[in-house]
Image (spheres, rainbow, N blue to C red):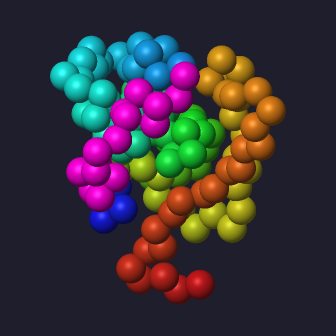
């Protein structure tokens, strides 16, 4: 976060720091995002915001690559997990295991959200339980 703060406070041409399609990215938000400056817009894009009716989180990296976070509700079977609301989560619901030993992650993403000639990776973000027995 400190690097982002120093970037935001230095004299910069904010228009050059943003992806070419930044206006379209902002339109993907169901909220009416209206930053007052390019610097504020850059900060919003770096921090991220909900898109796709609140089903995905979009942010951009320093190198202007799009990054998506997809909530567990999009790819985990509802009946096999305990669903909870956590205030620190970006999404409304998080999944808690019912002692499941394995699961599959499968989802589709609209091609308009992806950049051509870009390699993507998938990362699973999880928090182990406090009383983890295995």
Which residue is outermost to the bottom? 133
Q: Quadrant of residue 38?
A: top left
> Quick check: is 8 in the magenta stretch?
yes
- Side of 39 where 45 appears, left or right: right
| Observer-nearest of 5 and 24 | 5
| Observer-nearest of 102 and 7 | 7
| Observer-nearest of 31 and 44 | 44
Specify whether residue 69 is in view: no
Read off the magenta span.
Answer: 5-20
Q: Residue at x 53, y 29 (%)?
A: 19
- The x and y percentages for residue 98 are 53, 62
Residue 37 vs 32, above or below: the answer is below
Question: Which quadrant: the N terminus?
Answer: bottom left
Q: Residue at x 58, y 67 (%)?
A: 99
- The x and y percentages for residue 105 are 70, 47
Which residue is outermost to the left? 36
- The x and y percentages for residue 21 are 53, 19
Q: Residue at x 59, y 40 (%)?
A: 65
Question: Which quadrant: the C terminus?
Answer: bottom right
Which residue is outermost to the right? 117
Q: How many numbered marks, from 0 up?
A: 0
- The x and y percentages for residue 125 are 53, 59
Specify whether residue 98 is in view: yes
- Side of 133 where 43 appears, left or right: left
| Observer-nearest of 13 and 57 | 13
Q: Residue at x 34, y 41 (%)?
A: 12
Residue 73 vs 21, above or below: the answer is below
> Quick check: is 84 in the magenta stretch?
no
């Amino acid at each position: 976060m400190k690097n982002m703060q120093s970037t935001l406070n230095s004299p910069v041409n904010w228009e050059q720091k943003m992806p070419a399609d930044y206006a379209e990215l902002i339109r993907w938000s169901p909220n009416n995002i209206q930053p007052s400056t390019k610097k504020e817009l850059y900060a919003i894009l770096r921090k991220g915001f909900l898109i796709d009716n609140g089903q995905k989180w979009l942010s951009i990296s320093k190198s202007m690559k799009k990054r998506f976070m997809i909530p567990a509700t999009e790819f985990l079977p509802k009946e096999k997990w305990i669903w909870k609301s956590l205030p620190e989560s970006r999404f409304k619901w998080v999944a808690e295991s019912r002692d499941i030993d394995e699961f599959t992650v499968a989802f589709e993403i609209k091609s308009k959200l992806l950049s051509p000639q870009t390699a993507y990776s998938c990362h699973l973000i999880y928090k182990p339980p406090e009383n983890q027995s295995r």
